[in-house]
Amino acid sequence: MSQTQVIKVTKDTIKKMHAFYKNNLLNKTVPYTDFVAKVGSTTITAYTSGKIVFQGPDAEKAAARWGNAVPGKKAHNASSKKTTILPANFSQLSVLGSDEVGNGSYFGPVTVCAAYVDKTMVTKLKALGVRDSKELTDPQIVKLSAVIKELIPHRLLIVEPEKYNQIQPKYNAVHMKVALHNQAIYLLLKDIAPIKPEAILIDQFTPETNYKKYVRSEQNQVTEKLYFITKGEQYHVAVAAASIISRAAFLEELDKESKELGMNVPSGAGATSDKVAAAILAKGGIELLSKYAKLHFANTEKAKKIAAK
């Protein structure tokens, strides 16, 4: 999906950028430019005026490394979705990040974590291996989560399936996630007060306008310094830390469910989940299943058919 991003930088920053992209420079002369570079499918054109134009699928990410968008120059892409512009040097700021796990899994809870990483902790956390939880094994996630929780302020919310099933008719999946992210962030901001993060980064799961629409119905609304971006863990270690804590909590709850039921409870929502759900139905009916699974998933009806055979 092609994007165009425009930022304005100082002459000193242009020099740094020139050095940074030295291996990606294109041998072409464009009037009034300092350089033109290409990284993957993204082209970076640096004008002598200080205007930098990023064009390509990763324009937003490339631009976020160097500065803010020029006022009035909106980022745009093929779907015209609003694109978040992160402050300069965002990865080095003191940031509160949030992420959730479990929303797409039939079994287990939805876990949401907000984590605050002061700029003085960024390097230490990265050195410990805090990064995208998808790059880590489950045992690594559980082990790393325990370490992170000792090092940084965080708030973890866990909605067990039984509670989820009670809330779900009133809250659709997106609204529920908005409510949980907002509440985790609100509670963590209270915990760390009077300290205030320089930014709050939410791993984006819905357009910003949608998030703001749903958050209006919440009692304790957090609306300042909010940024939304997909794959947020790539932009700040705070989101990576939140993701790891959320994932570890989800895995621990699944393990607890497995022990209580005496059978291996899977994550996800595939055919294995249908079979396990059918076994739970045979054991204790829908009442027992409601304690361990999100009943509105299509898996429930599939499990009923398997159990009826």
Image (cartoon, rainbow, N blue to C red):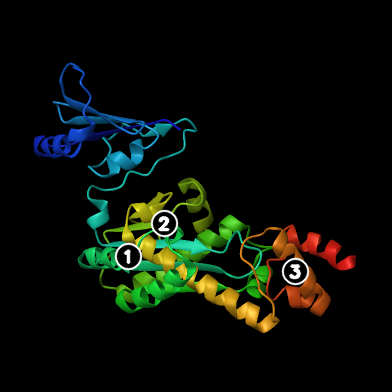
Residue indicated by mark 2:
202
- The x and y percentages for residue 184 are 44, 69
Residue indicated by mark 1:
129
Q: CA distance from mark 2 to mark 1?
A: 21 Å
Q: Residue furthest right?
A: 309
Residue type at mark 1: give it: Gly
Compare residues 72 and 85 and report the one nearer the observer. Answer: 85
Residue type at mark 2: give it: Ile
Residue shown at the point (68%, 74%) measured from the top left? 292
* First of labels 1, 3 by sequence position: 1
Secondary structure of the residue carrying numbered label 1: loop
Quadrant hosting residue 187: bottom left
Residue type at mark 3: give it: Ala
Task: Answer few, some or many: residues within 10 Å of disc 3's Cα (few below 14, many 20 plus, some between 14 and 19).
Answer: many
Q: CA distance from mark 2 to mark 3?
A: 33 Å
Residue indicated by mark 3:
277
Q: Is residue 296 left or right of residue 4?
A: right
- The x and y percentages for residue 96 are 34, 63
Q: CA distance from mark 1 to mark 3?
A: 36 Å
Residue shown at the point (42%, 58%) measured from the top left? 135
Secondary structure of the residue carrying numbered label 3: helix
